[in-house]
Amino acid sequence: MENENTKAQRVVDFLEEDQVRAHFADINTELLRGHHFQQDEYPEFDIILSKKDDFNNFYRIFYSLCLKHEKYDNQDFFYLDCIDESKGKLGHSSRHRELGQEVTIIAIILINIYHNLYFEKEKIITWSMLKREIEESENKEAYKKLFFQHPKSVQTDGEWMEVQKRFKRAIREFTRLGWVKNLGKREDDVHIEIRASINRVAQLYAHELQNFNDFVERIQAL
């Protein structure tokens, strides 16, 4: 019978290929941090695609994780997930840390905007669009409860600046995860492209998306 060392060697044989070896450290680090590689990330995505069975075996054997290949809105992406999905939403060892409640809320807001831009090839948004979503969308009352200590018809510039800071912190996290691409050239700007891979959150939080007001009430009650 084949011994364990021989099996392990066979699993890592693909790492000897020149292109894989040249980029494996970056791919491995980012996947284990929770990054979602989408098809515009060259050459990393192409390497994963061409060797996806090898990568999946590698993570299954050495990390007890599986490499997921999904498609949304005609965009393919890869990420790591638990083999046993019963371990909970976003709560597995391939993540650097779990999403907080506020970050999850902001992700849901971005998903709603993504779907509103269905017919747009690129889902590009700015701070003015985010502000309009909070002020005018069907969820505006829930959003104001979440983001303002004293919600009123017109919030001050200072209050909006604080909300913008909270969005920017979340956007930095989403950029790391590969859910958004930061297009802003200025530090005080919010100018991003929402990527198809953010819809993984929609899968994990389908109930919360469909019952958003109840979700907000539960968070405020904590």
Image (spheres, rainbow, N blue to C red):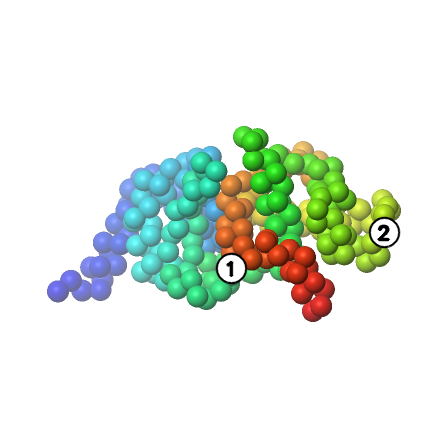
Q: Which mark is residue 216?
A: none
Q: Quadrant of the N terminus?
A: bottom left
What's the residue type where badge 1 is placed?
Leu
* Upstream in sequence: badge 2 or badge 1: 1
Q: Residue at x 69, y 69 (%)?
A: 222
Q: Quadrant of residue 45?
A: top left
Mark 2 nearby-residue class (10 Å; few <14, some 14–19, many ≥20): few
Vertical position of residue 95 compared to residue 73: above or below: below
The residue to which callout 1 is attached is 90
Q: Residue at x 28, y 47 (%)?
A: 14
- Location of residue 101 in the rendering, given as x and y in whole percent from the top left corner: 64, 60
Q: Mark number for residue 152?
A: 2
Q: Quadrant of residue 39 in the image?
A: top left
Residue 41 lies, in percent from the top left, at 46, 37
Residue type at mark 2? Lys
Q: Is residue 88 above or below residue 123?
A: below
Mark 1, residues whose alpha carbon is within 10 Å: few (<14), some, or many (≥20)? some
Q: Residue at x 61, y 50 (%)?
A: 108
Q: Nearer the viewer, mark 2 or mark 1?
A: 2
Q: In the rendered image, is residue 113 in sight?
A: yes
- Front residue of 4 and 189: 189
Q: Position of residue 81 (x, y in %)?
A: 43, 57
| Residue 178 as seen in the image, left or right of residue 186 | left
